[in-house]
Image: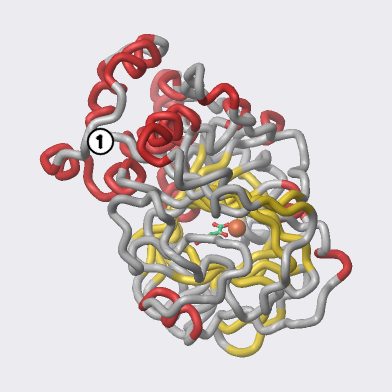
Amino acid sequence: MISSFLECFQKIWLSDLLLFAEHTYSEPRKWMRGKGRVNIQFGCCYNYAMDKDGNLPGILQNVIADPIPHLFKVIIRRLIRWHVLPATCIPDSCIVNIYEPGDCIPPHIDSHDFVRPFCTVSFLSECNILFGSNLKVAGAGEFTGSVAIPLPVGSVLVLNGNGADVAKHCVPAVPTKRISITFRKMDENKQPVGFKPETDLQNIQPLPYDSEAKKLPHQDWNKQPAVESKSFKKGKKSKGRSAGIKPEQHLYDSQPHPYDPSMSMNRSPLRVMDDQPAMASNASERRRNFVGRSTESKPKPDLQDIQFHQDDADDLTNRSVQRGRHEEEHDNLESSKDYGGRRVRMEQRRIIISRNMEAEEEALPVGAFESELAEKGMREPQQEQERQEGICAGKLGERDPTFLTM
Ligand SMILES: O=C(O)CCC(=O)C(=O)O
Ligand SMILES: [Fe+2]
């Protein structure tokens, strides 16, 4: 009896192990240039296509995946605290895509086994992501699409609404190694059997807005954004569509933002200024030459409503800290563009947060942090802290990670 129980247990355990190996890590076959990428999953195992056991695409119900690593949890906490994702969508699973040169992700819409919004953080090198309802394969790892958005290192792309559910997206063959991490919350009905939510990912609270920042609008995740354009130039404000930019012209090729203290053209490509021509920079040149750039120029009626936010990151708590220094310089970081006939709204936000916050945040119980924050304000980043936090948290905590919200 006992031995058969053990045998049974061992079988289940072994089969889980096998399933681990089979489902949580996958890599493209060598001949599949331009067709794949290494893929590691945490929190759940997502089946992209029906597998040889007949499992349908979707979250595998009978597979226990590796838990989300600590550093990823740090990122998740920040995503919620900084209002990048709503507290109703705390990610409980993530996918790491490791792209070697030539690797890509083909056009797809992320499974509805995961709730919206969800987001992807980019590391190692910048690449373009294409969006469109009619993305076409132009060759191995080459696609054409309606809209190309550069994803700088450290940027966060948030997908929601039509951007997540109507338009497909793809990453054409990357020129240099790149890693992305996609953070998603499972639909509660789609969680694997026996799934236990991580206790340290519960009850993460968005940072409160301070009294000054309270005057600024909160992000309402249930509301489609209004089509209103405000220039970053002081005093200028325009409603409705602004002058069109050519589809080949990237949304973010623009001038440095006046209030970025660490501005360099390479590091801050994400600036949207009304009616500004694209500016040459290494990053934008790279994008222009990039194989995956947007090539469709005709408007697509079904994409008219897609709205891009570009949230160059700041939760309002931090914006309020910045405002003391920069209030003169900016009005509101929102703009709206016609993009080849598509109505595109972008928000550009920044977070400048001391990396020290991380250590404090980890040490403090939830709730304690908020009051501490008001007293301490923001401090300059510290090298040692950066070293300790490593690339993921470092980038997310560094100066102004870019938040692109769709
Ligand atoms: O690598 C990226 O930026 C996109 C990844 C993606 O679309 C996905 O994992 O579903
Ligand atoms: Fe995706």
In the image, taking residue 44 as reference, residue 246 lies left or right, namely right
Nearer to us in this view, 7 or 327: 327
Compared across the picture, whether 100 is left or right of 79 comes to left
> Which residue type does callout 1 highlight?
Arg
Q: Nearer the viewer, residue 221 or 31?
A: 221
Residue identifier under label 1: 355
Residue 130, placed above or below residue 164: below
Residue at 31% x, 64% y is 264
Q: Quadrant of the image for the N terminus?
A: top left
What's the residue at 50%, 46% (across, down)? 330
Position in image of residue 46 (x %, y %): 58, 49
Let me know if residue 350 appears in the view.
yes
| Left or right of residue 54: residue 18 | left
Q: Residue at x 34, y 68 (%)?
A: 266
Q: Can residue 158 be seen in the rendering of this structure?
A: no
Q: Quadrant of ligand 2?
A: bottom right
Image location (x, y in percent) of residue 17: 41, 44
Q: Please tell me whether mark 1 sits on a helix, a strand or a loop.
A: loop
Callout 1 crowding tier (Cα within 10 Å): few <14, some 14–19, many ≥20: many
Residue 76 located left or right of residue 144: left
